[in-house]
Image (cartoon, helix red, strand yellow):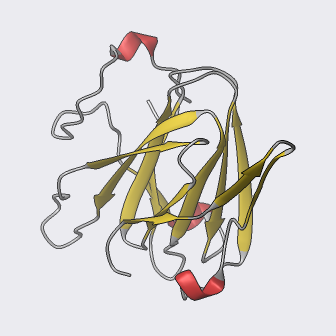
Amino acid sequence: MKNPKIISYKKFRDKRGYFSELFKKNKLKNLFIQDNLVFNKKKNTFRGLHYQLKPFDQGKLITVLKGSIIDYVTKINKKSQKNEAIKKFFLSEKDSKWLWVPPNFAHGYLTCEDNTIILYKVTKFYSLKHERLLNIFKEGINVKMKIVKSKIIASKKDS
């Protein structure tokens, strides 16, 4: 798949709770080599927009295990030095969805709740040398957030 896409999975609920098959290879043909788990202590934590250059360009499959996020994705266009419009996706522990982010897309998210836990699968290993980021707070990246910048919690690298 060459574009970001939401992939749904089912939760089978009963009085004990629920059971869910989080990932099935037949829904997505990519070979994932690593799973990452991210805990975000506070609401309004922002991580991203990150991507990696070839040969370490990563595809990512993202889901929320606890809490909720607004996920931001944009295609990287190296030829024109401009990126496409940023697309937003809402993911929650309640919606039973994954977001597929193909290689050549920058990705980041803003947490909507305290104690948010995110699981994501990647198609290639991380390489510091190949990592790049787009600063969501810079001019020219038009992201409409319903929060003022001063309330966003971000690392030095991401802000």
Q: Position of residue 132 (x, y in %)?
A: 44, 57
Q: Position of residue 81 (x, y in %)?
A: 17, 62
Rendered view: 70 above or below 45: below
Q: Is residue 53 visible?
A: yes
Residue 131 falls left or right of residue 138: right
Rendered view: 56 above or below 118: below
Q: Position of residue 120 (x, y in %)?
A: 64, 59
Which residue is at 42% across, 72% downward?
Answer: 102
Q: Residue furthest left?
A: 80
Which residue is at 44% across, 72% downward?
Answer: 53
The image quarter containing residue 1 is: bottom left
Which residue is at 15% across, 40% downward?
Answer: 140
Q: Residue furthest right?
A: 16
Residue 6 falls left or right of residue 86: right
The image quarter containing residue 73 is: bottom left
Q: Position of residue 92 (x, y in %)?
A: 54, 41
